[in-house]
Amino acid sequence: MTTGTSSATFTLVPTNVAAAPSLNSIDVVMTAAGNTSLGTSRVFGVSAVGDVVGGADVSLSGNTSWWTWGANAITLLSPYFSTDQGSGVLSRFFFYNSGAAVSYSASCKTETGVTATAGSAATGTLIANGTTHILAKDVCSFSSGIRGSVVFTINSPTTQVRGLYSLGFNGNNNNMLPLVRPYNTNTDE
């Protein structure tokens, strides 16, 4: 099912339906498209209409909250980060976790013609009730250049983890950019 689809149609042939008064079970499977947010919950409802051959259709009462999927992870992203390892350059991610230790994974994105390779810190754990810092160069490397973007998927409740990207130069300005929560109302402002 896609975001814009509110219903799906299934066709049953008469040989799939046992004679009355037997019960008939129909398994419904929904496969994630792989491109929807983790940061919002979903509620699925079911109802049915039996298209009876040679008779009137039969409506089956539905269940508006047949399956509720709660948000079980969040995403935090930075549209830019640098893996610069020059003298005096500090390029890091900081995460504050106010709850139990949680796992994370990072996916680096690149410009056209550049590929990213996951580094030693592409997956890991954010410590409980504290701050975890991760060196940007350990998240990924690039086939060309030193810049890209990154999406962190963190297995925690929405309000538990905050993050920022820090690019600092020894003796000069430090830039700190909050990581963006891209879905629904999960934004840091």
Image (cartoon, rainbow, N blue to C red):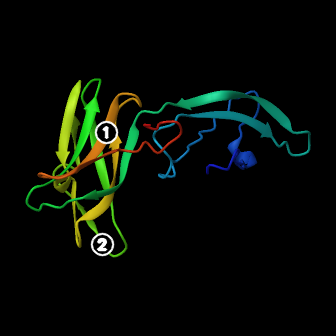
The crowd level at tag 1 (other Cα within 10 Å; few <14, some 14-19, many 20+) is many
Image-based side of 127 in relation to 171, left or right = right
Residue 130: x and y in percent read 21, 27
Q: Nearer the viewer, residue 57 or 80?
A: 80
For numbered disc 2, what is the local secondary structure?
loop
Image-based side of 3 in relation to 82, left or right = right
Image point (18%, 40%), residue name: 133
Residue 143: x and y in percent read 22, 71
The crowd level at tag 2 (other Cα within 10 Å; few <14, some 14-19, many 20+) is few
Image-based side of 138 in relation to 154, left or right = left
Q: CA distance from mark 2 to mark 1?
A: 26 Å
Q: Amino acid at mark 2?
A: Val
Residue 70: x and y in percent read 49, 30
Image-based side of 75 in relation to 91, left or right = right
Image point (46%, 38%), residue name: 187
Pointer 2 residue? 114
Q: How many marks?
A: 2
Locate residue 159: give its quadrant.
Answer: top left
Q: Amino acid at mark 1?
A: Gly
Give the quarter of the figure containing the C terminus: top left
Residue extending furthest left?
Answer: 87
Nearest to N terminus: mark 2 or mark 1:
2
Q: Nearer the viewer, residue 109 or 167?
A: 167
User: Circles 2 and 1: CB distance less than 8 Å?
Assistant: no
Pointer 1 residue? 163
